[in-house]
Image (cartoon, grey):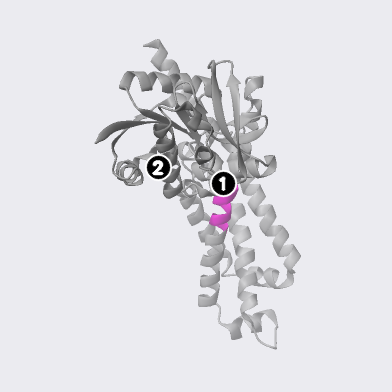
């Protein structure tokens, strides 16, 4: 049985975590798909350059160095950075000179799941393996049909690598940017941000629960119409978003012109990550206040206090919880300074990129 080695060069962080969960599954899957004609071994190297160089040419040079050093048969680089070709999103880039593959995880969008990543790695590895002895296979339909119809393949000569590349590109720019943005947000993992918001959640809930003991909150929630309640919730959410961004200096300013578009994307990703976390935060507060209001405020007593003779419906409790959530979010925004700043920063691309560049500079000094 023919034995082959698949090398995976992965960027640190979320990409590394996802690949580590697949290590044991990939060899068996490769063997099964190749109909037991090949025995596969998978080796993984985590390299900061794979996740820090906005230029994919630097990444290819580094990945190729790992390939030669470890004598891999097939090499796949997996980065958590976006790749673009003439403004369009690239899912994968194949260097035909040495059959090195580079996959961009953010291009998978919300489909950033283990099974999707595993299938993509397997298909790419087997296609490259089968085309080792026949370069024409790189242009065969089987190679192109790895991706859905909304992708197209482009073959071009890259001057920096002095070789032809085949790139798989998403046809629509708008869909591509939306997919990149959602993919980068998923990689940031908004749930991690909730860990640092847990203390703020406690502060906000305590304040809202205290205010709920007074009739002023009930009366205001009764007097406010739906638009006014909506305005209060939107204002509190946006206020918290702005306060976190400013207080933790999360807005990235590009230091070089060639990184300007990446910094814009990093900033949008930071905002979408924070917004996702705050919306979850707000929804949790809403459920807590709804439960609290239903438990502590009997309908008859609430109706008597508000002067409602026809009785209290469930929508009245929804209004109270809605108003209390907005108030608690404002208080939580003020208390965000008490949160774990490092955990907040680690949920942003810009901060992680700075750390990776710092690691690379330290390596060069040694």
Q: Residue at x 48, y 22 (%)?
A: 60
The extreme top residue here reads 365
Left or right, 363 with respect to 54, comes to left
Magenta stretch contains residue 278: yes
Q: Is residue 296 above or below residue 81?
A: below
Q: Is residue 7 above or below residue 170?
A: above
Q: Write down the residue under mark 2.
A: 18
Residue 45, disc: none
Q: Residue at x 31, y 22 (%)?
A: 70
Q: Is residue 205 above or below residue 30?
A: below
Residue 148, disc: 1
The Cα atoms of the two marked residues, 2 and 1, are separated by 23 Å
Within the image, what quadrant is residue 226 found in? bottom right
Q: Which of the two residues, 37 or 177, is positioned nearer the viewer here?
A: 37
2 or 1: mark nearer the eye: 1
What kind of secondary structure does the magenta stretch mostly adopt? Answer: helix
User: Could you tell me which quadrant the N terminus lies in?
Assistant: top left
Q: Position of residue 88 (x, y in %)?
A: 65, 35
Query: Which range is magenta?
Result: 275-282
Q: Position of residue 278 (x, y in %)?
A: 57, 51
Magenta stretch contains residue 68: no
The extreme bottom residue here reads 310
Is residue 141 in sight in this rendering?
A: yes
């Amino acid at each position: 049985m023919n034995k082959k080695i698949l090398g995976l060069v992965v960027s640190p962080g979320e990409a590394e975590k996802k690949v580590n969960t697949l290590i044991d599954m990939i060899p068996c899957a490769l063997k099964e798909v190749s109909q037991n004609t090949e025995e596969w071994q998978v080796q993984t190297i985590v390299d900061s350059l794979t996740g820090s160089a906005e230029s994919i040419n630097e990444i290819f040079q580094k990945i190729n160095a790992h390939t030669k050093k470890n004598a891999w048969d097939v090499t796949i680089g997996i980065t958590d950075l976006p790749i673009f070709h003439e403004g369009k999103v690239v899912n994968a880039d194949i260097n035909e000179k040495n059959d090195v593959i580079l996959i961009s995880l953010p291009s998978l969008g919300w489909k950033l799941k283990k099974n999707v990543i595993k299938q993509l790695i397997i298909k790419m590895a087997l296609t490259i393996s089968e085309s080792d002895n026949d370069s024409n296979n790189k242009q065969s339909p089987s190679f192109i049909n790895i991706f859905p119809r909304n992708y197209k393949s482009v073959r071009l000569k890259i001057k920096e690598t002095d070789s032809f590349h085949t790139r798989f590109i998403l046809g629509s720019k708008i869909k591509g940017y939306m997919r990149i943005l959602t993919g980068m947000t998923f990689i940031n993992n908004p749930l991690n941000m909730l860990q640092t918001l847990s203390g703020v959640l406690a502060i906000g809930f305590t304040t809202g629960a205290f205010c709920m003991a007074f009739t002023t909150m009930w009366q205001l929630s009764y007097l406010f119409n739906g638009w006014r309640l909506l305005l209060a919730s939107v204002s509190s959410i946006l206020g918290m978003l702005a306060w976190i961004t400013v207080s933790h200096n999360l807005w990235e300013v590009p230091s070089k012109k060639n990184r300007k578009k990446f910094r814009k994307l990093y900033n949008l990703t930071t905002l979408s990550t924070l917004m996702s976390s705050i919306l979850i935060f707000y929804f949790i507060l809403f459920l807590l206040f709804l439960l609290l209001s239903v438990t502590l405020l009997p309908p008859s007593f609430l109706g008597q206090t508000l002067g409602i003779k026809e009785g209290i419906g469930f929508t009245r409790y929804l209004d109270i919880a809605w108003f209390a959530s907005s108030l608690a979010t404002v208080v939580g925004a003020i208390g965000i300074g008490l949160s774990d700043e490092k955990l907040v920063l680690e949920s942003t691309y810009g901060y992680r990129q700075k750390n990776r560049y710092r690691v690379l500079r330290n390596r060069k000094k040694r």
